[in-house]
Amino acid sequence: MRYLILSDLHANLQALDAVLADAATVGYDEILVLGDLVGYGGDPAPVIERTLALSSSWMIRGNHDKVCAGIESPVMFNDVARVAAEWTHEHLSSEHLAMLAQLPEGPMQVSPEVEICHGAPFDEDFYLFEESDAARAMASSDARICLFGHTHVPTLFAKADDPFGNQIGATDEYRLPATGPALINVGSVGQPRDRDPRAAYGVLDLDRQTILLKRVTYDIAGAQASIMAAGLPAWLALRLERGQ
Ligand code: ZN
């Protein structure tokens, strides 16, 4: 079984299309969507349509999906995120808003071995950056492989003394640790924040026991033009070329 992992798409149609085209050459059996389909980017409706067309049975919500859908207040958002969420809410159809509102909360068990969450297994909105927090996340995970997103930074955490956990920011294929839980963030499709502007995605291969962390160049100028045409804050366009 090979799972294509998509997280933090953020209404970036150009990045999503580039990732799907690249992933088709790699190959996969099922798709896992880890939330934040919308927010920040200028093409929320096409990104929702593309994502629905993937017919993924494994899809959870992110914090931006909740706020853009109108089911959570933007009180925790900074000004730029709030402005983008309000714009997104105003420019989506009632059907698309309902779709976002119906996305389930993580964590979601995909198989006995794999679970997905947006932030952390114990809190869907938690930013999992630190090793001390990773230990807490491992203690609360029911699966050997826990896939997460939300930070937009490719990250691998495993139990202390396992070399798997020392490859943060890597962009290649790694052998999964024999024992879990391992926490894996493949990075963000639509708004990478590790200073590498290329779109990020991953493929978890349970037959070969590997995780592939891939980066793909895409039409950043096109995504930026969409953001500016929408009248969204210019920083949202600039940060895409900086990978920030
Ligand atoms: Zn996000």
Image: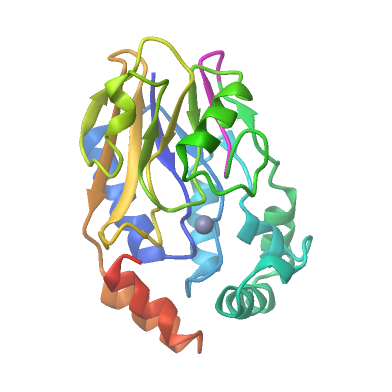
Count of numbered tags: 0
Query: Which residues are the magenta region?
Result: 111-118
Q: Is residue 212 above or below residue 43?
A: above
Identified at 27% across, 22% down, the residue is 163
Q: Is residue 48 above or below residue 220?
A: above
Q: Is residue 238 left or right of residue 55?
A: left
Residue 86: percent from the left, percent from the top? 67, 77
Residue 185: percent from the left, percent from the top? 42, 40
Q: Is residue 137 above or below residue 42?
A: above
Say which quarter of the image contains residue 225. bottom left
Q: Main secondary structure of the magenta part?
A: loop
The reply to whether the magenta stretch includes residue 101 is no
Residue 125: percent from the left, percent from the top? 64, 49
Task: Tell me the quadrant of the picture where the C terminus can be found.
Answer: bottom left
Identified at 25% across, 63% down, the residue is 218
Say which quarter of the image contains residue 123. top right
Identified at 70% across, 58% down, the residue is 66
